């Protein structure tokens, strides 16, 4: 009872050695895949890195949007340039803090 999907076993030495080498390569790939699945710590670290990068992008986007919004608002706001700069910095700090808080809260 042989499996029809299994190729015939070679009878010459070179063919056998080639077949053995291919089988070892497939076995090594399978073992590596199983080891990667079993590496929970590695998977967790990869997920943390992904979340960190995502959070950094979100913070950068929010910071850019906040800066643009504060700039638009401060251009029409009364007061000296120094007062407007202080308001701009305060706005950026607040928006950044809220963005970081939202990212940390989602974890």
Image (cartoon, rainbow, N blue to C red):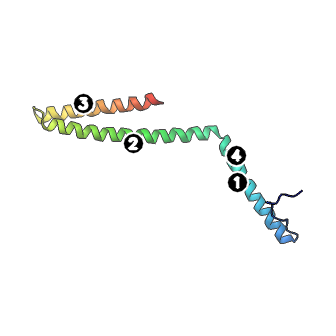
Q: Residues within 10 Å of mark 1 (few under 14, many from 20)?
A: few
Mark 2 to mark 4 CA distance (whole Å): 33 Å
Place of residue 71 in the rendered image (x, y in percent of width and height, measured from the top left) = 20, 39
List the residue tagged with mark 1.
29
Side of 10 where 102 appears, left or right: left
Residue at which label 2 appears: 57
Q: Earlier in the sequence, mark 3 or mark 2?
A: 2
Q: Nearer the viewer, mark 3 or mark 2?
A: 2
Q: Gap in Å between the C-alphas at discs 3 and 2?
A: 21 Å
The secondary element bearing badge 1 is classed as helix
Q: Calculate the distance from the C-alpha at mark 1 to the C-alpha at mark 4.
A: 9 Å
Secondary structure category for the residue under label 3: helix
Instruction: Name the N-terminal-most of marks 2 and 1.
Output: 1
Location of residue 79 in the rendering, given as x and y in whole percent from the top left corner = 10, 31
Label 4 crowding class (10 Å Cα cut-off): few <14, some 14-19, many 20+? few
Q: Which mark is residue 90?
A: 3
Q: What is the x, y in percent for residue 29?
A: 70, 54
Mark 4 element type: helix
Left or right of 49, for residue 12: right
**10 Å crowding of disc 2: few (<14), some (14-19), many (20+):** few
> Looking at the image, do the residues carrying marks 2 and 4 touch, with CB atoms under 8 Å apart?
no
User: Any mark on residue 96, and which?
Assistant: none
Is the N terminus in the top left, top right, bottom left or bottom right quadrant?
Answer: bottom right
Counting residues from the start of the chain, the first of labels 2 and 4 encountered is 4
Residue 53 position, x and y percent, is 45, 42
């Amino acid at each position: 009872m042989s499996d029809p999907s299994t190729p015939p076993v070679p009878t010459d030495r070179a063919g056998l050695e080639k077949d053995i080498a291919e089988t070892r390569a497939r076995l090594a790939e399978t073992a590596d895949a199983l080891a990667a699945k079993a590496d929970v710590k590695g998977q967790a670290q990869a997920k943390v890195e992904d979340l960190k990068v995502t959070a950094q992008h979100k913070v950068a986007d929010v910071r850019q949007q906040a800066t643009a919004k504060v700039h638009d608002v401060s251009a029409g706001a009364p007061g000296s340039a120094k007062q407007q700069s202080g308001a701009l910095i305060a706005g950026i700090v607040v928006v950044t803090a809220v963005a970081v808080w939202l990212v940390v809260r989602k974890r």
